[in-house]
């Protein structure tokens, strides 16, 4: 009797496991569709149908890990803060958990690979991440308004994305981000930007 052919989520999970293993051991530069297909026991054509580049496949695999291990994306977390400060603190900590889930090996490889990828591929991934980050921040600001906090009108997307970009930058520099740094980010930068005096 032959092997049962995997499909759908079962096959996708097997592919993602193989991708994470390869990236953890060899970095993104060691990732090829041929290698993934061989180790996941599927064909290259199956992989080509879903991902344009090994880079995009790597991003998808690690985003899958973040969602599974952290019970969803950051724009889906259940917020329970009593004010904007608390919600921001919860969101920033959850974002750091997502970054830690990626792992330093992947982040180092990611930085190198971003420089090697076409602008279109990188831009598509960055736009998707920014969209998720904006959804999370919009939820937080809407909650603050509903609680009666004095949220400024017309906050630009750049200012909404500021904390995520700051945390990514610190992570890429391999800086340890502690609770005091997050508190300073929120109290000294974000609260004055988002709330009226």
Image: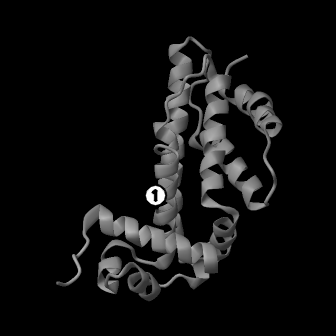
Residue 73, relative to residue 142: is it above or below?
A: below
In front here: 68 or 189? 68
Residue 175: x %, y % from top left: 81, 55
**If the image is split into quadrants, where does the N terminus sit?**
bottom left
Residue 78: x %, y % from top left: 49, 30
- Evaluate whether residue 154 shows in this view: yes
Q: At numbered mark 1, what does the secondary structure look like: helix, strand or loop?
A: helix
**Residue at left offset 52%, top offset 65%:** 123
Residue at the farthest left position: 1
Residue 138, relative to residue 73: is it above or below?
A: above
- Left or right: where 62 falls relative to 186: left
Residue at the farthest top position: 148
- Evaluate whether residue 127 shows in this view: no
**If the image is split into quadrants, where does the C terminus sit?**
top right
**Residue at left offset 81%, top offset 39%:** 181
Quarter occupied by residue 111: bottom right
Quarter occupied by residue 110: bottom right
Residue 63: x %, y % from top left: 49, 58
Residue 194, relative to residue 71: is it above or below?
A: above
- Left or right: where 62 falls relative to 47: right
Residue 136: x %, y % from top left: 52, 37
**Residue at left offset 55%, top offset 77%:** 22
**Residue at left offset 67%, top offset 31%:** 89
Query: In this figure, which residue is indicated by the disc labeled 1?
Result: 64
In front here: 80 or 56? 80
Tell me the crowding category of disc 1: few under 14, some 14 to 19, or many 20 or more residues within 10 angstroms, Cα based. Answer: some
């Amino acid at each position: 009797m032959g092997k049962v052919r995997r499909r759908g989520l079962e096959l996708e999970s097997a592919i993602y496991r193989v991708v994470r293993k390869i990236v953890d051991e060899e970095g993104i530069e060691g990732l090829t569709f041929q290698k993934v297909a061989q180790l996941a026991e599927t064909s290259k054509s199956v992989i080509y149908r879903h991902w344009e580049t090994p880079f995009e496949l790597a991003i998808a695999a690690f985003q899958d890990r973040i969602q599974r291990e952290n019970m969803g994306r950051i724009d889906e977390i259940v917020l329970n803060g009593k004010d904007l400060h608390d919600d921001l603190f919860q969101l920033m900590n959850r974002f750091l958990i997502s970054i830690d889930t990626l792992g330093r090996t992947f982040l180092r490889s990611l930085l190198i690979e971003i420089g090697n990828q076409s602008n279109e591929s990188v831009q598509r991934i960055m736009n998707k991440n920014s969209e998720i980050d904006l959804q999370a921040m919009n939820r937080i600001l809407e909650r603050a308004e509903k609680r009666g906090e004095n949220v400024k009108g017309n906050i630009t997307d750049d200012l909404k994305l500021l904390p995520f970009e700051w945390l990514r930058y610190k992570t890429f520099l391999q800086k340890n981000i502690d609770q005091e740094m997050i508190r300073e980010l929120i109290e000294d930068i974000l609260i004055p930007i988002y709330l009226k005096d």
